[in-house]
Amino acid sequence: MYDRIASDHPRPSGMEFAPPPLAAGTGALPLAEPVETGENLGSGEGTPVRERPTAEIHGHDNHPEATPFPPFAAPGVGLKQGCYQLTIRPTPALVSYSGTLRVERRGSSTTASGDLYRFLNLPLALQANGHAGAAEAGHSPAVLASLDPTALGRPEIPIHPRNKYYSYLKVTGIRQSPPLPPGPHLVTLTVEEYCYTQPSPGSFNGTFPAGPSRTFTMVLHPVPTLPILGGPTFEGSLMEAGTPRATVTLRWISPHYRRATVEVDTLTGAVGPQPTPDASGTGTEGIRTVFASANWDVTVEYDQIEIPVPDGVTSTTCWSHADLHQLMRAVRKPTTDLDKEWRLHLVVVPARIGCGRGVMYDTVDVPREGVASFCDDGYPSTESPFFGSAADQRQRDVSRAFLRSACHELGHGFNQVHQEQEGGADNSIMTTTPSVANVLGGPPGVFPTDIVLAFNEHVRHHLIHWPDVAVRPGGLTFGSGHSTSVPSADRLLFSPDELHLKLEVDHDKIDLGEPLRLSWRLSNRTRLPIPVPSDLGIEAQHAFIRITGPQGRQKTLRSMVIRTDHVALKPLEANSARGAEARVYWDSDGFAFSAPGRHLVEVELLWVQGTVPVGARATADIWVNYPQSRTDNDVAAILLHPEVGMYVALGGAAHLREAVNRLDSVARMAGFENQPEPGALRGYEGITPDALVHR
């Protein structure tokens, strides 16, 4: 049901929705693919877990009834579908590796992938340094149990700290011995391991190698399992080049592959997305069942309601990024620890039609932690002629489409992109709302009634088998790993006499710590209209700003906010122009201009016309001045601070007190010992806080 593409229902002229060609943050990611086994392995089918209908209740975990365990988990031979807890203990065991292995079965093929986290084997390490044991070092049994992946307790999918992430496992071969004697029953897995290079401090994008770091086999045999430990359980050896390197324990713990929590908060005057009747009319579908289509175990917490509107904000107008950021910081669960749980925050505010159905914050404090939905925005008939009864209605009044839109933003939070750029629009969660309506087409009533509240196979494969760091909140930045960056040689760049992109900068010489204001304008110099993205801002993910520094290091500036659901390919008429602007300074990977010298700034517009990748490009030279005085050095040291960077990225944010204080301290330098106003403040014009004192 997911392979219906937009071409099945031709769009009217000017209504083609544009696939944003995201620039991957880390290059290609390793990804497991199906392995042909020739026969079904073990028990269980390869279809998604289908939850029984359940209401999503305020403040409750709302789990369906637990999967019953048999009185005794007898040894078996095949690999049961679901999530396994994986423990690898090398010899000597100064370190151990704990993580998960996900096994997905489809008939005679199986896809298996896993993630490992590295832990110091604390008691042995202390003994090796002359200590009698962990107790002398002050480590409690609870701490030691948290490091021991075999600690007793009710089985659940484990979650480990991000800085302990070690490697991704891609299973490339599965063999099993005949289930009948003579001889032991064995399962042998051939595994490619991709070791992860952790990011530098202050950054979030680590890297995987292009090829496997090593290949090994795990030779496993089934063992009896106590019911409280789940099961089936396998034990055995990790073999590398025919030599045993470690012992292995593999224990089935869940029919789901991953688990996460979605926290939903609603402002006064807003309503959150609610479960909606399913197609049969006997049950409901909600956020939990949408993610169950990828076999995820998602707990939905409808947490705070009737949140007061922040001072100075009109809740029924379009929200500024700074106001939304302030609200999300204030209301998200203060005890959130992304190293202990996968938690995504959804805040719902009213807004109005025309503001956009939702946004995804790439950075609140870390990547992909929060998303927002605008319940009073909706379905303008100008975006699609196939909105049917939902046309010009608010989201809050069209429950099925509202739920779809909210889950779409949550999907962005787990690093999934639009399907228009990954195979074509269809009737699934990660296709933009207008494209879903266009795919459905037909008479009024098809949209929203026939909306499918599920992920398609492509997104489902990513959600199940991508590395943990690619999907978990607080991991890689948005867009990382998606193979949507077309090499320049394969992209058709319009010539200046067709589409001319003009790049303008306010100043071609700036001080250290000064943001660069630039704008770009795309002009159609032909006699015919040319389809161009309706929004050319960096938030819409069609405009990319790249900075090449004095040492040749290239940086792509990332937008702090991802807002793409409204973007369409719309004709740019002859002799007409479309443009956007940005203030270039900082993103979650650091500063654009952190050293003096010559920088090349490039703006590239990228989109896909039909099946042809197209674009336009323009460049400008920028000189970052060398500090000429102690004051210049002091100003740069004060302003090159991440919170000042976030302040600029939000377009000014008075709630970021550290940034306000730093800007205020720089402003106060004016007049001190007859000093002029620091030149770097020029780049903050229009976004300086009211508290600044200029002398």
Image: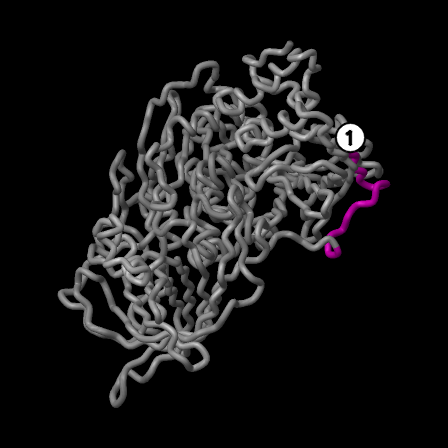
User: Looking at the picture, which amino acid does disc 1 mark?
Assistant: Asp
Q: Secondary structure at mark 1?
A: loop
Residue 56: x %, y % from top left: 29, 39
Residue 306 seen in this snapshot: yes
Magenta segment boundaries in residue numbering: 489-503
Residue 171 appears in which quarter of the rendering? Answer: bottom left
Residue 183: x %, y % from top left: 27, 88
Residue at the left extreme of this rendering:
71
Residue 651 appears in which quarter of the rendering? Answer: top right
Q: Nearer the viewer, residue 166 or 20?
A: 166
Which residue is denoted by mark 1 in the rendering? 508
Q: Nearer the viewer, residue 430 or 474?
A: 474
Does 572 appear in magenta? no
**Viewed as shown, does residue 686 lie left or right of 176?**
right
**Viewed as shown, does residue 42 lie left or right of 354?**
left
Question: Which residue occupies 61% across, 42% down?
Answer: 17
User: From the viewer's perspective, is residue 680 above or below residue 446?
Assistant: above
User: From the viewer's perspective, is residue 522 above or below residue 677?
Assistant: below
Question: Which residue occupies 50% across, 37% down?
Answer: 363
Residue at the top extreme of this rendering:
695
User: From the viewer's perspective, is residue 647 above or below residue 471?
Assistant: above
Residue 357: x %, y % from top left: 50, 32
Q: Residues within 10 Å of mark 1 (few under 14, many from 20)?
A: some
Residue 325: x %, y % from top left: 48, 28
Figure quadrant of the C terminus? top right
Residue at the bottom extreme of this rendering:
182
Q: Nearer the viewer, residue 441 or 592?
A: 592
